[in-house]
Image (tube, rainbow, N blue to C red):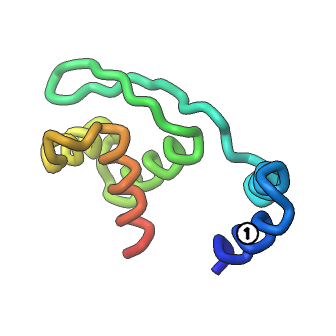
Amino acid sequence: MVRARLNACCVSRGPSARRSISTSIMPRMTRRPVKRSLTLRGHRTSVSLEDEFWTAFRDMAADRNMPINALAAEIDAERGADLGLASAIRLAILRHYRD
């Protein structure tokens, strides 16, 4: 519903309005992902996520009473070969908060 209102508003005002409205709705949203290292099955790997996703990922791990590396390894083991780890983590976070 919010997206529909945002799109309806932006269509009448053009693309520059879309940028200004989007930043006013989510002023804290970072524009660039932050790269952090995780250890999966004994190997270090880097994952790039926006700050808000890192916060949600840490909260998700805490909700499940598990270290973030263990949660990342679980997500990694369940993802398909065609899905990157960062995308798999974002989708897992989305599912976690939808349930």
Residue at screen point 41% across, 55% down: 60
| Residue 50 to residue 34: above or below | below
Instruction: Name the amino acid type tagged 1.
Output: Leu
In the rendered image, residue 68, in percent from the top left (x then y), is placed at 35, 40
**Which of 7 and 31 lies nearest the eye of the viewer?**
7
Q: Residue furthest bottom?
A: 1
In the rendered image, residue 64, in percent from the top left (x then y), is placed at 32, 58
| Residue 70 to residue 24: above or below | above
47 to the left or right of 1: left
**Which of 90 and 23 lies nearest the eye of the viewer?**
23
- Number of residues whose C-alpha sits closer than 10 Å to that of mark 1, classed few (under 14), some (14–19) or many (20 or more): some
On the rendered image, what quadrant is the C terminus found in? bottom left
5 to the left or right of 76: right
When asked about the image quadrant of residue 3, the answer is bottom right
When asked about the image quadrant of residue 98, the answer is bottom left
In the rendered image, residue 50, in percent from the top left (x then y), is placed at 55, 39
Residue at screen point 74% across, 47% down: 28
**Which of 40 and 26 lies nearest the eye of the viewer?**
26
Q: Which residue matches tag 1?
A: 6
**Which of 45 and 19 lies nearest the eye of the viewer?**
19
Residue at screen point 68% across, 75% down: 2
Q: Secondary structure at mark 1?
A: helix
| Residue 89 to residue 4: above or below | above
91 to the left or right of 25: left
